[in-house]
Amino acid sequence: MKSLSVACALAALAIAVAPAQARQSGLEEVVVTGSRVTEYDPVKTPFVTLNKRADNLITTVRVVCDTRDLSQRKQELKATLRNMIKAAPAAGVELGLEGEEVIGRFDDTMLDAVIRPDGKPDTSVALLIVKTRVAPADTFDAATGRIKAFAEKTAKAGRTEILPTEDWNLTLIGPQRYRGEVLTLVAEDARKVAGTFGPDYAVAAEGLQLPLSWYQSGPLELALYVPYKLTVTPRPK
């Protein structure tokens, strides 16, 4: 772990902000809850955090069809997927593909690629991510309600069903771009601590080189932080 005095840390922070701002074009949308979220620990989690509302609420949707004839089954699934693509903008949702951490795009050129056999005989399924933007005034129920209404109201072909899961997750677009803001908050806190203890004490911050972490602080809110450690020691006489 690298230890920095307050003065050195502030200089490093000024340098760190510029690259973070420069990378804001072409940002990836990252799933920040589920397996990616850090649990809040009152002992280990730093006091200084940056509160951010999630960019999107997402869930996995199973588009399932059990028409016996395979060719007909695929036609019904494709027709339903096309209906979903057409209905999404008016419903306030977007469709995507699930990666390990990043949400990928989905369009009508990918219909064959997403259809696969399901666990039951004579059944095929397509798994999609459905997401909705989290507005400033949104509640959790309002955001999840848009996705549920979309699944219910979209026209289904034949024996196709659209089945949302109840596994809701949050995403941030380019979360590491907020690192500079978090480090600025850490520096401000370090200044206050240094002022409280006076000139006979030195304040050092360890861990400022680590990537941004986060925990879920509310239904649609996240707390972003760098897992740093602040120490106060007497200056050598």
Image: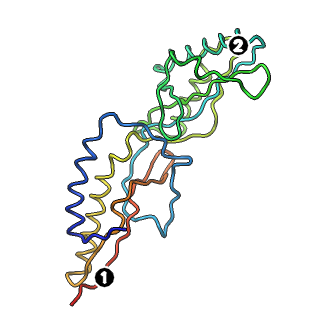
For residue 137, which quarter of the picture?
top left
Tell me the amino acid under the disc marked 1: Thr
Q: Position of residue 217 (x, y in %)?
A: 48, 53
| Mark 1 Cα shell of 10 Å, populated few (<14), some (14-19), many (≥20) | few
Of 195 and 124, the residue lying toward us: 124
Q: Residue at x 56, y 46 (%)?
A: 34
Answer above or below: position of 184 versus 130: below
For residue 21, which quarter of the picture?
top left
Q: Residue at x 74, y 21 (%)?
A: 123
Answer above or below: position of 179 versus 7: above
| In the displayed structure image, the side of residue 108 where residue 187 appears, left or right | left
Answer above or below: position of 165 versus 4: above
Of 117 and 81, the residue lying toward us: 117
Q: Residue at x 36, y 37 (%)?
A: 27
| In the displayed structure image, the side of residue 51 where residue 76 appears, left or right | right
Q: Which residue is mark 1?
A: 233
Q: Secondary structure at mark 2?
A: helix
| Mark 2 Cα shell of 10 Å, populated few (<14), some (14-19), many (≥20) | many
Q: Position of residue 231 (x, y in %)?
A: 34, 75
Tell me the amino acid under the disc marked 2: Arg
Q: Secondary structure at mark 1?
A: strand
Please give the label number shown on residue 73. Answer: 2
Mark 2 vs 1, N-terminal side: 2
Q: Residue furthest bottom?
A: 237
Measure how far apart labels 2 and 1 are at the Cα level. Answer: 70 Å
**What is the quadrant of the C terminus in the image?**
bottom left
